[in-house]
Amino acid sequence: MTRLAPKPLYEVRVSPHFWLTAEPLRPKYTHEQFAEVIRTIRKAIDELAEKGYVDEVGWNDHLLSKRPFLDGNHFEFHVYDDDVLVVYFKREAHRVIRMVGIYDHENLPSE
């Protein structure tokens, strides 16, 4: 008897633009390190789909409290080193997560 994988709790939407937001980080890392950052983020996206939050692949998953993300639905977690920040938007009622961007502390959008 074949077991089916459990259905993810959340639908995670990842646009091509999300991956483009990582480009400013590329010069900070070697090719191998940057590839590891991207692999880690992909694993974190899988974890978001399963749980709705990140606590194994990344750390410090928390609600953002500064503009332009001050709406109660934008979250951030850290991966790789403490300066790779991944922002996502969660619509709890619909069980949908939209990946917003990959930043460091220097290029995180702020008003």
Image (spheres, grey):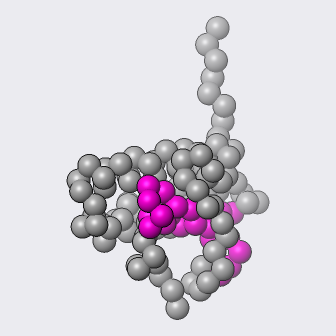
Residue 94 in which image quadrant: bottom right
Above or below, 107 relative to 8: below
Along the horizontal axis of the image, is 107 left or right of 76?
left
Image quadrant of residue 24? bottom left
Q: Which of the 4 image quarters holds residue 21?
A: bottom left
Point out the residue furthest to the bottom here. 111
| Residue 2 falls within the magenta-colored stretch | no
Q: Is residue 11 visible?
A: no
Q: Residue at x 64, y 8 (%)?
A: 1
Task: Give the total of numbered labels.
Answer: 0
Could you tell whether 39 is left or right of 70 in the image? left
Please indicate, yes or no, whether residue 41 appears anywhere in the rendered image: yes
For this orientation, the residue located farthest to the front is 82
Residue in view at x 66 percent, y 66 percent: 62
> Where residue 23 sits: x, y (%)?
30, 67
Q: Is residue 6 above or below residue 78?
A: above
Residue at image point 24% right, 56% down: 30
Along the line of sight, the residue nearer the viewer: 47 or 12: 47
Residue in the image at 64% along x and 18% along y: 3
| Camera-nearest residue between 34 and 6 | 34
Confirm whether the magenta stretch covers residue 77: yes
Across and down, in percent, residue 5 comes to: 62, 27
The location of residue 9, given as percent across then percent down, is: 69, 44
Residue 83 percent across, percent down from the top left? 44, 67
Q: Main SS of the magenta segment?
A: strand
Span shown in magenta: 70-91
